[in-house]
Image: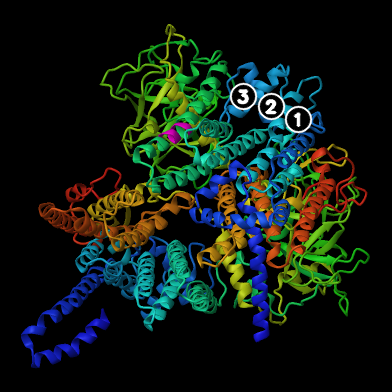
Amino acid sequence: MVISSATADPQNRLSRGTMLSSIKLPIVIRAEINLVLVVLTALGVFSRLYGIHFPKAVVFDEVYYGQFVSLYMKRVFFIDESGPPLGHMILAFGAYIGGFDGNFIWNRIGAEYSSNVPVWSLRLIPALAGSLSVPLCYILVVELGYSHLTALGATLLFLMENSLIVQSRFMLLESVLIFFLLLAVVSYLRFHNSQSSSPWRLVWLLLTGVTCACAVGVKYMGLFTYLLLLGLAAVHMWQLIGDRALSNSVILVQVLTRFLALVVLPLLLYLGFFYVHLTLLYRSGPHDQMMSSAFQASLEGGLARITQGQPLEMAYGSQVTLRSVSSKPIPCWLHSHKANYPIRYENGRGSSHQQQVTCYPFKDVNNWWIIKDPGRQDLVVSSPPRPVRHGDVVQLLHGMTSRFLNTHDVAAPMSPHAQEVSGYIDFNVSMPAQNLWKVDIANRETEQEVWKTILSEVRLVHVKTSAVLKLSGSALPEWGFRQLEVVGDKIYKGYQPTGVWNVEEHRYGRSQEQKERELELHSPTHIDINRNLTFMAKFLELQWRMLTVKQETSEHKYSSSPLDWITMDTNIAYWLHHTGNAQIHLMGNLVTWSLGNLALMGYLLLFLSYLLRRRRKIEDIPEDTWRQLLLAGVVCAGGWAVNYLPFFMMEKTLFLYHYLPALTFQILLIPVVLEHVHTHVLRCTSHRRALHGAVLAGLSSVYLTFWKFSPLTYGHPELSAEQLDSLRWKDSWDVLFRRH
Amino acid sequence: MAKKECVTKCKGESSMLRNRRGELQIGEPKSPVSTHHESTQDSSKDNRLSEGDDQSSNGTLAQYDHNVYSPNNETQSTVYFLVVVLLSFSTRFYKIKEPPHVCWDETHFGKMGSYYINRTFFFDVHPPLGKMLIGLAGYMTGYDGTYPFLKPGDKYEHHNYWGMRGFCASLGSCLPPFAYLTVLDLSQSSTAALISAAMLVFDTGCITISQYILLDPILMFFIMGSVLCMVKFNLQISRPFSAPWWLWLVLTGVNLSGALGVKFVGLFVILLVGLNTTWDLWRLLGDLDLSLVDFGKHFLSRVFGLIILPLFFYVTIFAVHFVVLNKSGPGDGFFSSAFQSRLIGNNLHNASMPEYLAYGSTITVKNLRIAGGYLHSHWHLYPEGVGAKQQQVTAYLHKDYNNLWLVHRPNDSNGEPDLVRHGDVIRLEHKETTRNLHSHRHEAPLTKKHFQVTGYGINGTGDPNDLWQVEVCGGRKGDLIKVLRSKVRFLHRATGCVLNSSGKTLPKWGWEQVEVTCSPYLKETPNSQWSIEDHINTKLPNISLAVLKPHFIEILLESHIVMIRGNSGLKPKDNEMNSKPWHWPVNYQGLRFSGVNETEYRVYLLGNPVIWWLNLLSLGLYLVMVAAASLALHRGVQLDKRRIERCRVLREGGGLLLLGWLLHYVPFYTMGRILYYHHYFPAMLFSSMLTGITLDTLLQSADLVLDPPYSYWLFKGGKAMLFLTILYSFYLFNPLSYGMRGPLAHDPASTMAGLKWMDSWEF
């Protein structure tokens, strides 16, 4: 659009001089198109940006995204399993512009923002993305080959969609996602429609790749539309390959270009997002414990502070904490304390009544163990230190209680098929010591490898029973202080992270006396060396953790099932004034939603009837129109389907806002179907006039509904209880009001 | 440079020559079956006619080609077929009686077979056909249904178990012959067919799974039967509405109903046949020579053969199931009161109890949602963080004394046995724990929009939150409440919400029972309606109540909902090592059928790794080959006739099998239920058949790189190597199926020493 206006301008100046009356007409038309788009954009900006600093309180999921924004500002590392980091970074950029220092406690929806929070700039970027989606809708419909009037209709419907407005006006990610999705589709269509010689063609292709990556980078949901576009591109490419007029080399170049732009480029960009993310967040924080020790050691101030300068190689006499490599159910350290297993469990089984050995998810002085040579008595590191290697047999002595790590043929408390692990000391009772363990380094490169701090993943294999020291995954009851159970597993197979441990904190022991040693254990370690993970290693670990972290699947008060979305049987209360009845709801324009569903059904009906009739060689519509209808179907109906249907297979907690991308595509389908019906189905003028009337009636009822619900969209003006009650069009909607 | 060009050109010419020879053998009429494929391709027919003359002049050479690549004369394939049948039955029946104890899931399916013989009603998550057939086989071979099938490892002793095993084994033995015929029809190459059959005959996994009392051999029999009949039906393309056309159509339908009648996995093969039929109809629709009336006939005949007929058989299976099982048994509680009254021995069968609900009665309250469960409570509290820490109230599907509740007036707990009326306010006291049914404004554990329901107070003392107003749905004030027949709602007095069962399963702390909530949404749904099932009041006279007999369709619907819910309820346990779908094609981990220790007789369900890995390799190979073939055709590369025919087999025959594999494998990725290794076996059948076609095509394509006769030698040599490899791997791994004793494989003294190629195998 911008290009066409630029070319129109000089013409305009010329025309003023000479042929004023005759050339005026085409220029006016061109200018009008531009104007429409400009006006629509302005309306979009107005509707999305108007008064976004209100309410000055935390609105719904802002409470969730806000904490990450704060962490970005403070450069503190975090993991968010809900999506890749680009979305959070975009929100954080808004905070950066506004000069937010990150000091706000995001704990409660409705909490008033303090003065240091730049509310306006925090909400600016999503609102801008929402506003710019408005002209994108227009361009998309035009690129699909439909008239400007149709495009105008689509844009108006998009403009007056309450749910999209609400979602754009706060610090939330859906509007950013929708913006990228629309841009990706628009740029791909531009690429497809432009002449093969045009230099802009490549730019549009590259833009498609970039925006696809951005969409996926904001939310994993973007993947669905990306796959749809890839499918479309594959079909177009297959048609190209079938063109026998083209030489093989031309086709090879085309295929390679598209592959690079649509597959390789997005992949690289995706990596790039993580690179920026990891570069920005270099300080340790609350989510450290979910990562491996090596990862934590790369963060400033976290484990790095503790482990900096630890000796690298284990030696006899080393004091260590052993962390389970598995972080399920939670990361923890091998632990023991002055409490014994109960003589009898609740179910009547007996135990050894020796000291408990558990896995404890917090740092504690009781997590310290000393590696002892079974053949010698001393507990200090000799000089030079004698390193512990793969295959060596050691004893592990608990630092604070001087019990040896021991396992024997007694059933473990919670997992009776496995052996109990206990802290053993010789009291001359009938039970013999079975406290020899073989060091088996799982990730060794040579058979002589030395056991290394953090880096080595070690299995401790019990010498007598060949059981492997393992985290069972169950928690002990009250008598075990709800700590995690550790067992000896005799049927241990292959590589299970629960059976592998690494040394996290490590120092060479210096004190022979128990009292001195206890003091030593309480003191922090500090010596100095540096360890670095490569970016790829960090990326892979972070990505894997994000995908495997168990998500809470519990129901939320406002969560809903995908079936409720099409008919909008559900809404979400985003904000309620703490005294009055002013409130904001995520609630769509019911008329638009119904029209969307009708359009979808209409499209399917049209498509099926044309398909069957064409098969019988009955051509109702020209080939070009059929192609156009097909492309519109793939983009709009396909866009709806790929963004909606997968939710039926998801087990996570779902909300109405997950439907918004699908809704966007569905809205675009409404005028497309109408135009097709108008030009190709209705033959008689009176029918067409009736359709015009229906369209006008539809648009005005959309506008009226939009206006009626706008108090719930903008949170202003405040409505009375009766007015609110009259807005409750469906029984299942939750509208809140206070009775005075 | 010029020289090089010449060389390639000359080479090209020689290959052209060779190709022409290749074309000839296609030109020969092979069998009546193969001709109509070609009739669909008009262009190919013309070519063939023009080549006709060369055929006589070059006859001997063409004959030679023909015999090497597709020795497709009748006698030879019959001999091959008989060999396959013989080998298949002998491998499956060898040592069928060993081990003479219950193995793995025999404990379930054997037990259910016995239920049929004893006519005891039970509940299972699978449809009944498989178990019915097992029961029938047992009955026919003299098993009397008295063996309890308590747990794996129990000795059968004098009981007649071999009949049931033999029945399963004979169905399992049909799989390789079916595969042979299917691939032969798809590819017209007996080599491909023989490779597929050999992969199945010598696969230890297929042997093991066929040898025991399990549903899988029955299921796979029907799946392969459907595919075979469908392929045969496709071959009748040129003779619509002829007798064989109808025969194969109807047989396909029958097999489909059989597959679905054994397990819901049968849906995947229905999908496969459905897609194939859609494609077929699409082709017919595009044939403008065919009038719309004719098309309508085609369409309706398929609707009849593939939808109505299977549906009829499927419903019949259930009808037989319900007629045969007429005694009360372990599955009663899953079903509605009306259904239970059909069962002899159930307390509702010819029930007699006081007709109207009265104060002081002991009752059970059943939710009206299908498979809704009884209102239940027990001596356990809601855990920390889940609403108030009071006693749990749940819905429970089994009959239990904890389902009993006492009906009281709000204040006193005794008094006259007055009748309860619509609109009365009552207090429900849990008989076992003496807590009152209670609700308050706390979020329910799972459905957060609803309120929590708890048991509160003791010995009748409580608070106003224990009061519920009884309403008969559609009733008026003062109406009496009929036991069993009235639909009742319980409105909570203090909050105005209604007692509701959400149907969601509580986590471990709630013993995986169903959540009960109090819903503020007053819409009338079965979830919020209850009926009084048992009603005990000594002060009132018992009256015989004829419960409305449920309609057969209702029972059918009810049992399906119960089955589907049961299936999705089989969630993986947290601590168990779960089998994941990606494990299966790589043969990552098997299943222990029998025995764990060194002293025991061990059978381990694990595919022959050579065969399985060959399958995996072939899948990749197939994709590459089919991509190359499609690309060549799409770009219009000049190909000779024989190669075009190979491309067709690869794309159509192979495509069908690949689709079958995908349909039987991919859906498992989306399933939340617990998965086992043996779920892959139907997919493995398709994968093996695909391997046959892929490897055969690959070997035949040897002439792309070698000139004849070397390419023929390569073809023959490759074929021989393949069969020898399969045979040798079977020789190595057969103890997995036929039993191992002595030390485990990691011990050098074991018979399986050195064969534990993956750490995850447990033998």
Residue B200 position (above or below residue B210): below
Distance between mark 2 and mark 3 Cα atoms: 10 Å
Looking at the rendered image, the disc whose residue lies closer to the viewer, 1 or 3, is: 3
Q: Residues within 10 Å of mark 2 (few under 14, many from 20)?
A: many
Is residue A324 at least partly visible in the picture? no
Dots 1, 2 in contact, CB < 8 A: yes
Q: Quadrant of the N terminus of chain B?
A: bottom right
Question: Which chain letter goes with mark 2?
Answer: B
Quarter location, residue A573: bottom left
Q: Amino acid at mark 1?
A: Val
Q: Which dot marks residue A528?
A: none
Looking at the image, residue B740 sits to the left or right of residue A641; the answer is right
Quarter location, residue A656: bottom left
Of pointers 1 and 2, the one earlier in the residue sequence: 1
Is residue B706 at least partly visible in the picture? yes
Of pointers 2 and 3, the one earlier in the residue sequence: 2
Q: Which residue is mark 1?
A: B102
Q: Which segment did they paint magenta?
A: B300-305
Q: Which dot marks residue B110?
A: 2
Q: Which residue does the image show at 81% across and 19% down from the upper left?
A: B158
Tag 2 secondary structure: helix
